[in-house]
Image: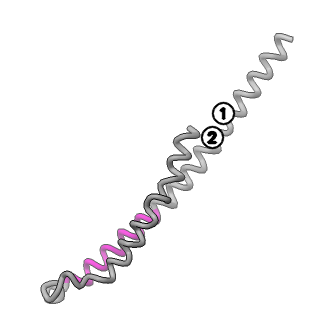
C-alpha cells in the first residue's frame, strides 16, 4: 500500500510540465490558419483544450487525495502489525 501511495503522489510530478505546455498551446492555435477561423473551430478547440486541462488538474487533485488516504491506511496497518507483535511477545513472556 505504501508503494501505491508513493506512486500516486508522483503522478503530479510527471504531468505538471506537459499540462502547462498543453494549456499554453490552447491559446496558440495559429497552425489552424484561415481554415480554422472559417469553420469556427479555433474557439471550440481552445475551449476543449481548456476543459481537458481542467479535468487533468482535477484528476491530479483526486490522485493526491487518494494517495494520502492509502498512505494513512498503510500507516494504520503498520501500527497494527507492531501492536500485534508486541501483544504476542507479551503473551510469551
Where residue 2 sits: x, y (%)?
58, 40
The residue where tag 2 is placed is: 73
Colour approach in the figure: one colour
The residue where tag 1 is placed is: 77
Tell me if mark 1 has few (under 14), some (14-19) or many (20+) residues whose alpha carbon lies within 10 angstroms of its own: few
**Residue 56 falls inside the magenta stretch:** yes
Where residue 84 sits: x, y (%)?
74, 23
What is the secondary structure assignment of the residue under circle 2?
helix
59 lies left or right of 5: left
What separation in Å lies between label 2 and label 1 (alpha carbons)? 6 Å
Where residue 40 sits: x, y (%)?
19, 86
67 lies left or right of 72: left
Q: What is the residue that sits farthest to the right in this orientation?
A: 93
Numbered mark located on residue 65 in the image: none
- CB-based contact (under 8 Å), mark 2 and mark 1: yes
Which part of the image, by quadrant, shows the N terminus? top right
Magenta residues, as a range?
A: 41-58
Amino acid at each position: 500500500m505504501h508503494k501505491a501511495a508513493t506512486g500516486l503522489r508522483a503522478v503530479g510530478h510527471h504531468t505538471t510540465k506537459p499540462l502547462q505546455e498543453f494549456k499554453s498551446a490552447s491559446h496558440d492555435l495559429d497552425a489552424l490558419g484561415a481554415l480554422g477561423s472559417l469553420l469556427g473551430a479555433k474557439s471550440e478547440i481552445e475551449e476543449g483544450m481548456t476543459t481537458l486541462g481542467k479535468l487533468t488538474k482535477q484528476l491530479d487533485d483526486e490522485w493526491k487525495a487518494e494517495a494520502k488516504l492509502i498512505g494513512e491506511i498503510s500507516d494504520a496497518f503498520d501500527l497494527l502489525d507492531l501492536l500485534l507483535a508486541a501483544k504476542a511477545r507479551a503473551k510469551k513472556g
